[in-house]
Image (cartoon, rainbow, N blue to C red):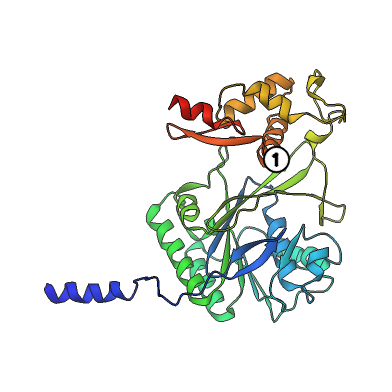
Amino acid sequence: METEKVSLFGQLERARITAQSAIPPHEFLYRWHGVPCFAKGELVAVTGKAKSGKTYLNSILMAAAGLEQVHASAAGCRRGSLLGLERISEAPMRVVWIDTEQSEDTTCEILRDRIGVMMGEAANEDTFHVFNLRRIPWQERILLVLSAISVCKPDIVIFDGIRDVVGDINNYEEAQKVIGQLLAVASEYRTCIVCVLHQNKAVEDKTLRGALGTELQNKSFETYECTKNPDTRIFTIRQVATRKYDMASRIDFCVDKEGLPMACESSLSEVASTEHLDKGFNSGYVGADGKIDKGRLFRIVLANKSLAWNELRSQIMQKVNIRSPHFAETLMQEARDGGILQTILINGRREYLIQGQQQLFDEVT
């Protein structure tokens, strides 16, 4: 027994970290609006509801990875837009794209008619390794994914979607095994594995699906949420969690008639006179510039109080007299991103209040 303990401690010693450990710092693949992101050797979660723009985000990542000239990505691709994303390395990156969700013709179409068009040339087959596993039984997929990474040794892996390598998304043992395998191979080959997983179906529930989602969220280096406003057809990418560098700004984009992502500068909440607003819209919150005065609106709704997200959305809908929860959430997200709102934890529940009012709650507690 004593010999076994010594042997186990020897194994533990090999995993020991000290202040003198020669461990290199994180190496990032991209900068987004100047912020380093997508670290080598880590998992990154991409999430959202169905048809919320996750594949567009993946396409942008792959187009930036494959550009021949790195500085072309700063100004944009040949067509379409990289939305401020810039590859850090001078040389194109090696890419593995695992597609378990879409048909083979859809995968090919995206590779040829979106990614290729954005790059200005066909994806180089020596650096792009694209596999469609939809026909493969789910029990066999994870071994194929691990094999692709070990053989191709990519800089980035787009894994769309991770749900399709487990039989039961709520099985914690399966979830831990799959995430553990991906973490191990990411670390061994210094690759960034971007794992795509849907959020729960309820509109107000933004958590990742099942035990697999919980494990992925816990182990991911960063999480990016994709949303789509059905009224404006504007997509938004937002970094919602990170272990390193916060990306303060969100990324809005729309899709042109050829199906390519394009940066867009305005959203529904910026123009009060838009035809999408409900009849009976309360114009009392529109400023002289014709835009909704979010500062005034939220100061009135949150006067000396805090509200949870759903409660705040309901109050905004009543105050502005609108029926669309999506419009209300757009207002809330822009107020949060613009520094009007801040969050506070009250009895373990996240609530929102006006920036600078924290002291009111500190005095109470």
* Residue 51 image point, x, y percent: 69, 48
Is residue 181 left or right of 319 when viewed as pictured? left
- Amino acid residing under circle 1: Gly
Q: Is residue 248 in sight in this rendering?
A: yes
Is 266 drawn above or below residue 179 in the view shown? above
Q: Residue at x 50, y 52 (%)?
A: 217
Instruction: Looking at the picture, tell me which residue is in the foreground, 206 or 308.
Output: 308
Q: Quadrant of the N terminus?
A: bottom left
Closest to the observer: 265 or 259?
265
Which image quarter is the C terminus in? top left
The residue under the point 64% across, 63% down is 36
Residue shown at 54%/69% (left/top)? 26
Residue 233's place in the image compared with 283, above or below, is below
The one nearer the camera, 127 or 99, is 127
Residue 23, relative to residue 52: is it above or below? below
Quadrant housing residue 20: bottom left
Secondary structure of the residue carrying numbered label 1: loop
Pointer 1 residue: 338
